[in-house]
Image (tube, rainbow, N blue to C red):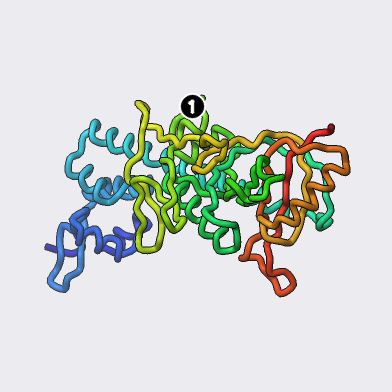
Amino acid sequence: MMDSEFISISKMARLHHLTRQTLIYYDHIDLLKPVYVNEHGYRYYSAYQIPFLREICLLKELGVKLEDIKNSIENRNPDSVVNLLEKQKIQIEEQIQELNRTRMLLQQRINFYEDTRVSHILNTPIIKKLPPRKVFYMPFTSKPGKDTLRLTLMKAWNLLYDYRILPSSGFGTLIRQSSFCSEDFYKSAGIFIILPDTQEDINDILNIPDTQEDISDILNIPDTQEDINGNINVPGAQEDINGSISIPSTQEDINGNISIPGTQEDINGNISNPGIEDVPGTTFACMYKYSFPYDKKDFCFLKEWIHKQNYEIIGDALDVCLLDATFYTSENEVDYCCLQIPVRKK
């Protein structure tokens, strides 16, 4: 054979905007083998192979896996090609959906931090209208402090993360209105995590079709119980070596949607299990401050101001953590928060 009768590997590579190494790899995986290898090991191809390599390049550019391309080339017919392209189209649509979800979470995080870029007068109450929100609530198992706050937050975070809900819109401490005047100020208090803003956003996160159901019907977490040491136990949950909680079994409806019930009250009206809660959109007395999002003295100060301004409290208090320990400076080694208490004029 004369080498001049064939196309050299370098020329074949240039013709298809590939590298020699790529064609060598295609040879190794039996995707496109040279028709001739001379005594010096140089690979040569025929003009007949050009349409095949062209198709390989096209399919690879469309994101098809090399293994699937190889099967397509070996079993070439219009039906198999259409099936391959339809399969790839579905995968691309799933990737787009995932990218849209990531973009949504990024925008929510940006929106959350935007409030921290506005200059607020510290420790000075103001009246603000805030939109409705959905939050996931996880009760404290002991009086809140820095460690209790962080550990309870991670338990809540892990439960949500098991359902592919990435908390991106903030968290804080929820203080029950029923405890405002009681001796046990932190009774039924707990961590809250703000969930995505709209039902459509929730559906995007959960990767399910649009639905009219409430998020409480779409998500599901079993009731929790405290052991003798005050630790939260979720029936059926397991803790891995890093302390992350996973729930091996969940209840799915006929459409395959998973649901977390809303919080429930016990016989004394106390809320002690995690769940989804609605925070109505209304007027709030707010105060920006540098302190931890459970400081009772901040609440007492704002509560007194509310009464002096002839307002009355109409719901639970939310102490939203805007900047946590990751933003500490030498001047401020505490959280930057916004205490929010729903009110109305008397």
The count of marks equals: 1
Q: Residue furthest right?
A: 309
- Residue 250 at what x, y percent from top left? 35, 39
SS state under label 1: loop
Q: Is residue 236 left or right of residue 165?
A: left
| Figure check: 187 above or below 208 | below
Q: Is residue 321 left or right of residue 3?
A: right
Q: What's the residue at 60%, 48% (across, down)?
A: 187
Above-or-below relation of 313 to 145: above
Q: In the figure, residue 244 lies in which quadrant? A: bottom left
Decide if residue 73 is in sight here.
yes
Quadrant for the N terminus in the image: bottom left
On the rendered structure, is 67 left or right of 190? left
Is 97 placed left or right of 106 in the picture? left
Depth order, front residue of 185/161: 185
The location of residue 335, given as percent across then percent down, is 68, 62
Q: Can see residue 170?
A: no
For image coordinates 63% across by 38% down, the residue present is: 133
Q: Position of residue 181 (x, y in %)?
A: 71, 45
Which one is in front, 8 or 213? Answer: 213
Density class for disc 1 (Cα within 10 Å; few <14, some 14-19, many ≥20) is few
Vertical relation: 127 (above or below) 294? above
Q: What residue is rendered at 34% in x and 63% in y?
A: 19
Kindly identify the amino acid type of the residue bearing the numbered disc 1.
Thr
Quickly name the residue at label 1. 211
Front residue of 38 and 97: 97
Which residue is drawn at the image coordinates 59% and 38% (left, top)?
A: 134
Quarter where residue 8 is shown: bottom left
Observer-nearest of 336 and 226: 226
Quadrant into which the C terminus falls: top right
Image position, residue 86 (x, y; %): 33, 34
